[in-house]
Image (cartoon, rainbow, N blue to C red):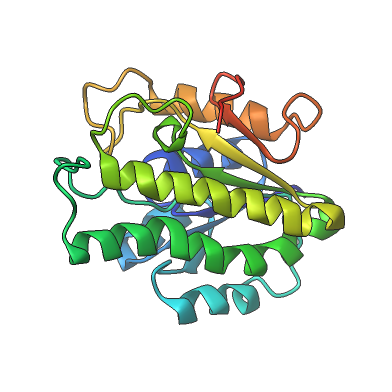
Amino acid sequence: MTTALVVGASRGIGLEFTRQYLAAGWTVFGTHRGEDDRRMLGELGAQTLKLDVRDAADVAGLAWQLDGEKVDVAVVNAGVYGPRTSTIAQPPSPEEFDTVLHTNVLAAMRLVPVLAPLLAPRRGTLAFVSSRMGSIGETNSSFGALYRVSKAALNMVAKLAHNEYGALGLRVVVLHPGWVRTDMGGPNADVEVATSVEGLRRVIADPAGHPPGGFFDYQGRAIGW
């Protein structure tokens, strides 16, 4: 049985990954924080795992919750945007910086050594949901500055994971889902969540066309770092 782990499975892009992998007949482990989310994911058919990515003990405990499992795909989707008014001319407060960087970056750094041993035996894929807003080469605006900084840092985490674990069989990719109509993206976003995730799943499923260590959008196009 093919197995996926979705970190941040209870809403938006993560929830859609959960739905689509379940519909394809996969076993899906989905992480959640609250009881309502646990029940909702369970009703969909997912195996549920309690995880607050900002809690180091929770992240460390993920390994024993998955003891003995071999995972084919892990999608790290948990993330926050932070202050909408953030620009380089209006720096974030220490509390805003701490929340965004802990959630989007430190959590990923803690997850890598936990997830890599679950994926490498099956030459699995560790996919980070990032954003084109984290591309340094393609940046032409300062809006969303804190989010941009966090996603650029996340991209570096992914590159480091590729360098560290690629030789063991782990494939690491970074994904840009587009501007998606979710709670984070808002109602005016231009991509349906189902369309985005269908495209991202095609990228994940195509290691020949989308090799390890790459940064790709939901349409399969490479993005500059």
Q: Residue at x 31, y 57 (%)?
A: 100
Q: Residue at x 64, y 69 (%)?
A: 114
Name the one closer to the observer, 222 or 11. 222
Name the one closer to the observer, 225 or 24. 225
Q: Can residue 39 be seen here?
A: no
Is 169 positioned to the left or the right of 223 in the image? right
Q: Can residue 204 be seen here?
A: yes
Q: Residue at x 72, y 32 (%)?
A: 205
Q: Residue at x 18, y 47 (%)?
A: 83
Q: Is residue 145 above or below residue 74?
A: above
Give residue 148's quadrant in the image. Answer: top left
Name the one closer to the observer, 64 or 42. 64
Q: Is residue 55 above or below residue 2?
A: below
Residue 37 in percent (x, y) is at 35, 58
Q: Is residue 152 above or below residue 207?
A: below
Q: Is residue 20 above or below residue 194?
A: below
Is 152 positioned to the left or the right of 211 in the image? left
Q: Quadrant of the C terminus?
A: top right
Q: Residue furthest bottom?
A: 57
Name the one closer to the observer, 224 or 49. 224
Residue 214 in percent (x, y) is at 66, 35
Residue 171 in percent (x, y) is at 75, 46
Residue 2 in percent (x, y) is at 74, 47
